[in-house]
């Protein structure tokens, strides 16, 4: 039998990130906690960065998903500390990014001074950064020098 906590957590965890729609907020590591106290569900999220414009959409989508799972009293709390890190990305999330055509970040301990990003299309390490800023502030734009395809890379933080 599924508990109320499991049902609430499952509903919140399934919410997709609006900027990286291949990832759930659980994959991304943005979902921090779910607590059921009586009739109230409190969901805690941490943004990828404090100015993330997608956070309001995530908070709204989480509240809706938990309400749709049968909980009328839902509170979504935003917590900024500790700050989110790309190390919070799940292995499943990293795999999904790669399959989606976005180069996932290396774990922070593996970031080198000379950053080489593998092309998510062909796997070549022969890539060049075109712009430090990509389609969103958390990504940079790269091009593979082998297959010549452009791709996004999630910045390690």
Image (cartoon, rainbow, N blue to C red):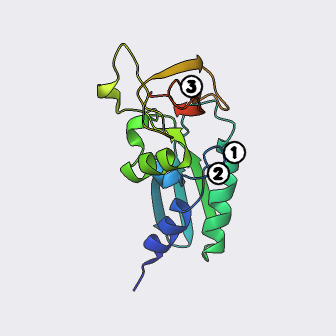
Q: Which residue is at a point 56% across and 25% down the rendered structure image?
A: 142
Residue 142 got which mark?
3
Secondary structure type for disc 2:
helix
Vertical side of 147 occupied by 132: above or below: above
Q: List x then y, in percent, for residue 27.
A: 46, 52
Q: Which mark is residue 83?
A: none
Real-space Cα separation, disc 2 to disc 3, in angstroms: 30 Å
Count of labels in the image: 3
* Quadrant including the C terminus: top left
Horizontal and vertical percent for residue 18? 66, 48
Within 10 Å of disc 2 (Cα), the crowding (few <14, some 14-19, many 20+) is many
Q: Earlier in the sequence, mark 2 or mark 3?
A: 2
The furthest residue to the bottom:
1
- Percent coordinates x, y for residue 114 in the rendering: 37, 14
Q: Nearer the viewer, mark 2 or mark 3?
A: 3
For mark 3, give the secondary structure.
strand
Q: In front: 58, or 112? A: 112
* Image quarter of residue 66: bottom right
Q: Is residue 152 left or right of residue 103?
A: right
User: Which residue is depicted at the point 42% across and 44% down?
Assistant: 89
Q: Which residue is mark 1?
A: 56
Q: Are discs 3 and 1 less than 8 Å apart at CB?
A: no
Report the residue marked by disc 2: 59
Q: Quick check: marks 2 and 3 in contact, CB under 8 Å?
A: no
Identify the image quadrant of residue 72: bottom right
Q: Is residue 28 above or below residue 15?
A: above
- 25 vs 101: above or below: below
Q: Is residue 156 visible?
A: yes
Q: Nearer the viewer, residue 19 or 82?
A: 19
């Amino acid at each position: 039998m599924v508990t109320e906590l499991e049902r609430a957590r499952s509903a919140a965890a399934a919410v997709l990130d609006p900027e990286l729609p291949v990832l759930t907020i659980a994959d991304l590591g943005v979902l921090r906690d779910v607590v059921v106290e009586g009739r109230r569900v409190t969901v805690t999220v941490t943004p990828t960065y404090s100015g993330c414009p997608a956070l309001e959409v995530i908070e709204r989508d989480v509240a809706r998903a938990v309400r749709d799972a049968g909980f009328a009293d839902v509170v979504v709390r935003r917590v900024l500390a500790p700050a989110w890190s790309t190390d919070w990305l799940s292995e499943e999330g990293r795999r999904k990014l790669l399959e989606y055509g976005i180069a996932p970040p290396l774990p922070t301990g593996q970031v080198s001074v000379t950053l080489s990003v593998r092309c998510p299309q062909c796997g070549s390490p022969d890539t060049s950064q075109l712009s430090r800023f990509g389609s969103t502030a958390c990504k940079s734009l790269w091009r593979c020098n082998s297959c010549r395809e452009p791709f996004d890379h999630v910045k390690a933080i």
